[in-house]
Image (cartoon, helix red, strand yellow):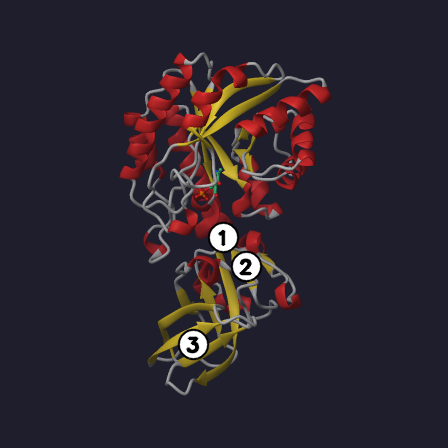
């Protein structure tokens, strides 16, 4: 981990802050783009994972497109220099002003998630005097074997159009004159570590594409979403996620002819290159004997543990002690769920020590809030240390 190597340089920065390993980001991008090019796959970066301007600058250098979930994300991507024609826009609830902006910018496709949305996009496109490219985001009903808070493709989920709804509305959808249905989209969930799940996904996609084609839809592309998981337990063992295995699985199971195949990766691109660096404020022991380490970060800088019960590996990067203790690491926010982890084995930890909360590059800063009127955390980049 970068923070351990550069710990001596970190003491002067105001904590908490995100530390980004730019070299690891580049190696990750080099890996994903070179393996994807073996199969002709096109990669979008899910900007919701982290919209930091310097990260986006590097991601753009490697030729990725962008996957957005809001009008402001589209604006951010365009301002960062991404070609609107490389931008896809999904989301179960798109506001009219966001759709108008997407239409105006002529993005690659609006991934529609209900028949009502298709009607609204059609009407807004007519109003703008345009015919707009859309993809149907289908709910494939797949169990992605991940934390239930971040699965998105099961039958009862709010995401995507059910296949039954498409069947019932085929004629209606095809009658929408200001839409071109050019793609099919799905995203089954996030932090997927059991790669065989992607085999099921491919089998579903094959069937859906066949059916949509027989219903008269002429699909140019298939967008299979993101979801590849990272190693939160032991990030040092796997700093770059296994894109090669995922692509090999997709290559041998996906059967969509000459259609373009797109992916939208968030966590697997930026997750491992970010750490949240925080300083120990206080130690105390509860009446029940639990040793608490109170750090100056909280759920306002990294909400994943409080929101989903997510695990992040934590290390003390400045203590030189040989003695180890088990600690509960808690944040400053006025919420009982503001706990980063329990039973963490650390060297003797004292006020002023720096801790790293690892694998925090994705869904960390982008979910930060100003609860308790905390300042938003800063960013420190390895190439500017
Ligand atoms: C539609 C869509 N695509 C892509 C992603 C990125 O997923 P991940 O970060 O797991 O790669 C998400 C995440 O929520 C999503 O909702």
Which element is circle 1 on? Answer: loop
Q: Quadrant of residue 128?
A: top right
Q: Which residue is mark 2?
A: 18
Q: Is residue 86 visible?
A: no
Q: Nearer the viewer, residue 109 or 55?
A: 109
The quarter in which the N terminus is drawn is bottom left
Q: Nearer the viewer, residue 336 or 294?
A: 336
In contact (CB < 8 Å): disc 2 and disc 1: yes
Label 2 CB sits under 8 Å from any ligand 1 atom: no
Answer with the quarter of the image where residue 263 lies. Answer: top left
Q: CA distance from mark 3 to mark 2?
A: 20 Å
Q: Earlier in the sequence, mark 3 or mark 1?
A: 3
Pointer 3: what residue? 319
Closest to the observer, 266 or 322? 266
Q: Residue at x 62, y 40 (%)?
A: 73
Q: Quadrant of residue 130?
A: top right
Kindly tell me whether mark 1's CB lies below 8 Å from ligand 1.
no
Above or below, comparing residue 164 to residue 354 in the picture = above
Reading the image, the residue beneath label 1 is 361
Dot 2 or dot 1, earlier in sequence? 2
Up-down: is 245 above or below 15?
above
Which mark is in front, 3 or 1? 1
Q: Position of residue 201 (x, y in %)?
A: 33, 32
The number of numbered badges drawn on the structure is: 3
Query: Is there any visible trace of residue 51 in the rendered image?
Result: yes
């Amino acid at each position: 981990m970068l923070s351990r190597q550069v710990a001596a340089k970190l003491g002067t920065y105001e904590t908490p802050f995100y530390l980004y390993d730019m070299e690891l980001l580049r190696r990750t991008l080099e890996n994903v783009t070179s393996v994807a090019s073996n199969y002709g796959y096109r990669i979008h970066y899910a900007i919701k994972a982290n919209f930091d301007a310097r990260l986006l600058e590097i991601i753009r250098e490697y030729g990725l497109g962008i996957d957005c979930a809001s009008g402001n994300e589209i604006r951010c991507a365009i301002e960062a220099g991404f070609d609107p024609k490389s931008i896809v826009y999904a989301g179960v609830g798109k506001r009219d002003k966001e759709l108008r902006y997407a239409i105006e910018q002529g993005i690659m496709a609006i991934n529609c998630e209900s028949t009502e949305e298709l009607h609204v996009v059609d009407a807004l496109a007519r109003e703008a005097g345009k015919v707009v490219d859309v993809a149907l985001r289908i709910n494939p009903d797949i169990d992605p074997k991940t934390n239930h808070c971040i699965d998105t493709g099961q039958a009862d989920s709010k995401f995507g159009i059910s296949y039954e709804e498409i069947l019932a509305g085929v004629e209606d959808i095809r009658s929408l004159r200001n839409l071109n249905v050019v793609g099919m989209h799905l995203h089954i969930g996030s932090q997927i570590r059991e790669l065989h799940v992607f085999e099921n996904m491919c089998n579903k996609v094959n069937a859906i594409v066949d059916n949509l084609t027989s219903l008269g839809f002429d699909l140019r592309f298939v967008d299979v979403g993101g979801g590849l998981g990272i190693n939160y337990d032991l990030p040092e063992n796997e700093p770059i996620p296994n894109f090669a295995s995922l692509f090999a699985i997709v290559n041998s199971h996906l059967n969509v002819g000459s259609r373009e195949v797109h992916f939208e990766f968030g966590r697997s691109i930026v997750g491992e290159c970010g750490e949240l660096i925080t300083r120990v404020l206080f130690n105390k022991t509860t009446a029940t004997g639990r040793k608490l380490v109170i750090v100056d970060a909280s759920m306002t800088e990294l909400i994943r543990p409080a929101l989903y019960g997510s695990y992040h590996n934590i290390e003390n990067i400045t203590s030189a002690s040989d003695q180890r203790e088990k600690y509960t690491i808690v944040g400053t926010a006025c919420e009982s769920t503001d706990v980063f982890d329990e039973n963490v084995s650390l060297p003797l930890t004292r006020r002023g020590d720096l801790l790293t909360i690892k694998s925090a590059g994705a869904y960390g800063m982008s979910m930060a809030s100003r609860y308790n009127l905390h300042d938003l955390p800063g960013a420190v980049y390895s190439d500017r240390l």
